[in-house]
Amino acid sequence: MAREGKGRVVPVGKAKTRYVTVPADVAGDDRFPFEDGEEVTVRIEEGKHRVVVEKVE
């Protein structure tokens, strides 16, 4: 399967909330660490231009 793919940042309505799409090849990989509806932590890594998504522990 795929460990990497191109997704999109999608705005929803007038809110500042954004959704990030995960390509089917990545989400379907048996190593994909998330389940539908699971709560996650989203944080910005300053200086690295990176957003990290992790399971809530």
Image (cartoon, rainbow, N blue to C red):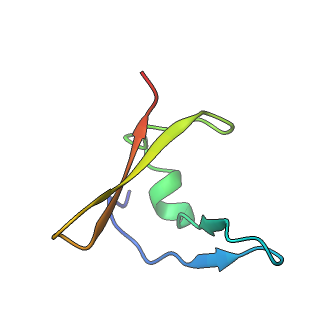
Q: How many marks?
A: 0
Q: Is residue 14 left or right of residue 17?
A: right
- Quadrant hosting residue 8: bottom right
- Quadrant hosting residue 32: top left
Name the residue at 28% across, 67% down. 50
Expressed as whole percent of the image width and height from the top left, the position of residue 29 reads 44, 49
Name the residue at 52% across, 51% down. 28
* Residue furthest out toward the left: 47
Expressed as whole percent of the image width and height from the top left, the position of residue 21 reads 59, 67
Q: Nearer the viewer, residue 35 or 42?
A: 42
Name the residue at 44% across, 78% down. 6
* Residue furthest out toward the top: 57
Q: Is residue 17 left or right of residue 1?
A: right
* Residue furthest out toward the right: 13
Quadrant occupied by the N terminus = bottom left
Name the residue at 77% across, 73% down. 12
